[in-house]
Image (spheres, rainbow, N blue to C red):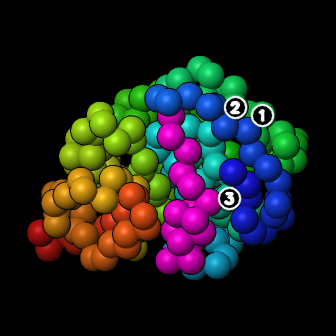
Amino acid sequence: MRIISGTARGTRLVSLGSADIRPTLDRVKESFFNQVGPGLEGLTFLDLFAGSGSMGIEALSRGAEMAVFVEPNPEAQRIIMENLEKCRMTGHSPRWVLLKSPALAGLKSLKERELSFDLVFVDPPFADDLYEPTLLGLSSSEILHQDSMVVVEHFHKTVLQKNYDRLELYKDRRLGDSCLSFFSLNDSL
């Protein structure tokens, strides 16, 4: 697992090595960033179920203005910090926040902090069936901009709905056993 592009390009990241936390594969990460665009300058990025922090750190490396990592597991939180240090992203004015919280509680905290996001990556444990509550929570959270993009990584046999309240599926991409589903806000729903 490594950073693919940007200021930290080529940096090898530490992973948890735990069966409970499955890192996003480099080819899935590369496809994700190819789909959302090469540069993320000025964008705010939310990494829900952050795990090792690989997606948010990649976003920062590619120029995102800010990344928020939401992760309840203390060991994963330690790994995120270690990876941020390896990528030299822990300086005087960091462009990231680590929320030590489960995803749904994290959404409430982000709203209270009046944070909002351009790009959201959702990658819950495949077996935990958290897609619907997370996507409904995001839809009603008021932390998305009108033109925000929400991308969900899931097992290819897991079928996601076309709509979760105001979030509407507009495309998906299968990558081996994983699939990336892309949602945008539709206020006419």
Does the segment drawn in magenta span residue 23? yes
Q: Is disc 1 surrounded by few (<14), some (14 to 19) or many (20+) residues within 10 Å?
A: some
* Helix, strand or loop under label 2: helix
Dot label at residue 82: 1
Q: x, y (%) of residue 99?
A: 55, 32
At 82% across and 54% down in the image, what residue appears?
11
* Helix, strand or loop under label 3: helix
In whole angstroms, how far apart are the C-alphas of marks 2 and 1?
Answer: 5 Å
* Residue located beneath label 2 in the image: 79
* Residue located beneath label 3 in the image: 58
Is 32 placed left or right of 146 in the picture?
right
Looking at the rendering, which quadrant does residue 133 occupy?
A: top left
Q: Can residue 180 be seen in this view?
A: no
Q: x, y (%) of residue 175?
A: 43, 67
Toward the viewer: 129 or 70? 129
Sequence-wise, the earlier of marks 3 and 1 is 3
Q: x, y (%) of residue 59?
A: 65, 61
